Image (cartoon, rainbow, N blue to C red):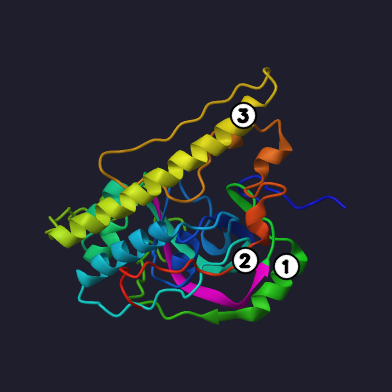
Amino acid sequence: MRKAGPRKEGNYTNPCLTMHQPWASLLVYGIKRIEGRSWPAPIRGRLWIHAASKVPDESTIKAMEDFYREIYALNGITDIKFPEHYPISRLLGCVEVAGCLTCEELVQWEALPQGVRLEGQTDFCWLCEQPKKLLVPFEMRGYQRIYNLEKKIYEAAVRGLVPVDGPAPVKFPLPNPRDPFSLKPGSIAASFPNSKASAIEKSSSLSAAIAGARGAAKQFSKDQNIRTNAILNSAPDSVSTETRTIFIDDRIPDGNLKEGSMEANSASKQSDYVEEEGSSSRNQPPTRPKQDSGAPSK
């Protein structure tokens, strides 16, 4: 039987996105409200979230949790319940993609809380709301970009969803309620002409948290490039590929799965997989690494 794999854009029935931890769980738990990508969201509505096989470093988890503590504190929210575990190779739940904006548009949209606007750190910002999680995450394989869930997985997963109460849920208003794609790059300037970017005063702790999150994502991108380069160096010479990591200003590089050179190598079906065959991390229990004694208490 042929395995389910990535589908062409526009042909989605039960779209799913594979993300690395801790970003995947933070999104499903409603803590992360903006999913950053270097490409615009091709869908609106429900998007399933799958956690890739890479075990997150303890320092990465701490950096991202510190980042979200600081940006929520801007809006007076100090009680954030982070996930107890960051499972890997699992289908975690879903969110609703309300729209997609450029980073510049998100920053100037003053109708949104300051913390939400600070989450915009990449070229395109997918606006996510109404998170739901699976009571029992499903073990499964992930793929690059957006792909359709297998029918049997979808049918089982949809019955196990429960709503999530995030620390500060956000409802992104559509410029045209009748058009789900009305909130797209360029729509804010046209629909909200008076929108402008207001300065956000950054404390030393906030600046440090932003720098820490940026460093965690940058190091992850470096590791990803090393891994993809190793694969590409063994590819046939006839396949032309290129590996790039783009950093824009002081934004946090996309800490999730990138659509880099592995995607460009469309001649190889193995490059469509996020998880490598034989990866030892697949056999590790989906538990959260123990925190340092100096890490913030839960």
**In front: label 3 or label 2:** 3
Residue 271 picture location, percent across and down: 66, 39
Relative vertical location of residue 171 with respect to residue 35 in this rendering, above or below: below
Going by the numbered disc 1, the residue's amino acid type is Ile
**Whole-percent x and y of residue 31?**
38, 70
Tag 1 secondary structure? helix
Expressed as whole percent of the image width and height from the top left, the position of residue 235 reads 68, 26
**Badge 3 local density, few (<14 within 10 Å), some, or many (20+)?**
many
Question: Can you identify the residue that label 2 sits on?
Answer: 91
Visible in this render: residue 277?
Answer: yes
Please check the rendered image and state whether residue 135 is part of the magenta-colored stretch, yes or no: yes
Whichever of callouts 3 and 1 sits on the residue coming sooner in the sequence is 1
Numbered disc in front, either 3 or 1: 3
Task: Magenta stretch: give its range.
Answer: 124-138
In the image, what residue type sits under mark 2? Leu
Q: Position of residue 151 (x, y in %)?
A: 75, 65
> What secondary structure is the magenta-colored segment mainly?
strand
Placement of 247 over or under 166, stated as above or below: above
Residue 190 lies in the magenta stretch: no
- Disc 1 to disc 2, C-alpha distance: 9 Å
Residues at badges 1 and 2 in contact (C-beta under 8 Å)? yes
Q: Quadrant of residue 208?
A: bottom left
Label 3: which secondary element: helix
